[in-house]
Image (cartoon, helix red, strand yellow):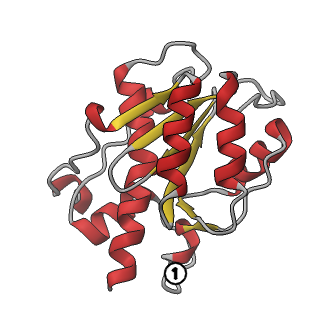
Amino acid sequence: MMSDPEELLPPYDGIKMADVRLVKSDQDAAEALAALSATDVIGFDTESKPTFLKGEVSTGPHLVQLATDDCAYLFQIGAVPAVDVLKAVLESKDILKVGFGLSDDVKRLRAKLGIDAHNVLDLSTALRKGERNTLGAKTAVARFFGQKLQKSKKITTTNWALPRLSEKQILYAADDAHVALKIYRHWRTL
């Protein structure tokens, strides 16, 4: 039996906790808006509390992640300053938003928050190179960086609607947005 070649790769060294900002106050929101507005491209993703029952409709997104080259900003939905900043950044036609599998994220943001995201590039289709299947972040990290992106099912399916997220949740979510931006920047240099 052949092993998965991705298993043999060294681990991807993700974003550090010191480079993650939880946007909780008006001042946090103002700082996030200034940093995000000052860049040409940001990494973008959302997390939603998982649904387990047939027919159950997601109430997400519960968390929106936006990343610059240096920092990831996490916006918990329900926190008051978040929506204004998200609307300003995500609706901006001047800032390119990049991420993986963004069609649901964009639809949910529109449905839940009335945010109509513009200038969004879904890397899962943009990086395909004629392949039939879409490309995920794990495959892109392996292909472009020769590293293995750790994607824990246990973290993926945690409750993203919790008022206090664990450090593992925070790093997982921040990495999702940050790695998308790093892959985009690398891809544009090829």
Near-viewer residue (106 or 33)? 33
Counting from the top left corner in percent of width and height, residue 127 is at 48, 76
Q: Residue at x 19, y 49 (%)?
A: 11
Secondary-structure class at tag 1: loop
Near-viewer residue (70 or 44)? 70
Q: Residue at x 53, y 86 (%)?
A: 130
| Residue 120, quarter of the rendered image | bottom right
| Residue 121, quarter of the rendered image | bottom right
Counting from the top left corner in percent of width and height, residue 1 is at 23, 57
Q: Is residue 1 left or right of residue 168?
A: left
Near-viewer residue (8 or 171)? 171
Q: Residue at x 23, y 51 (%)?
A: 12
**Residue pointed to by mark 1:** 131
163, above or below 188, in the image: above
122, above or below 17, in the image: below
144, above or below 170, in the image: below
Q: Residues within 10 Å of mark 1 (few under 14, many from 20)?
A: few
Q: What amino acid is found at the position of numbered circle 1 in the picture?
A: Glu
Near-viewer residue (134 or 102)? 102
Q: Is residue 163 left or right of residue 10?
A: right
Q: Is residue 134 visible?
A: no
Q: Is residue 127 visible?
A: yes
101, above or below 170, in the image: below
Q: Is residue 97 left or right of residue 88?
A: left
Counting from the top left corner in percent of width and height, residue 29 is at 56, 33
Q: Is residue 131 left or right of residue 51?
A: left
Q: Quadrant of the C terminus?
A: bottom left
Counting from the top left corner in percent of width and height, residue 158 is at 51, 23
Q: Residue at x 42, y 43 (%)?
A: 72
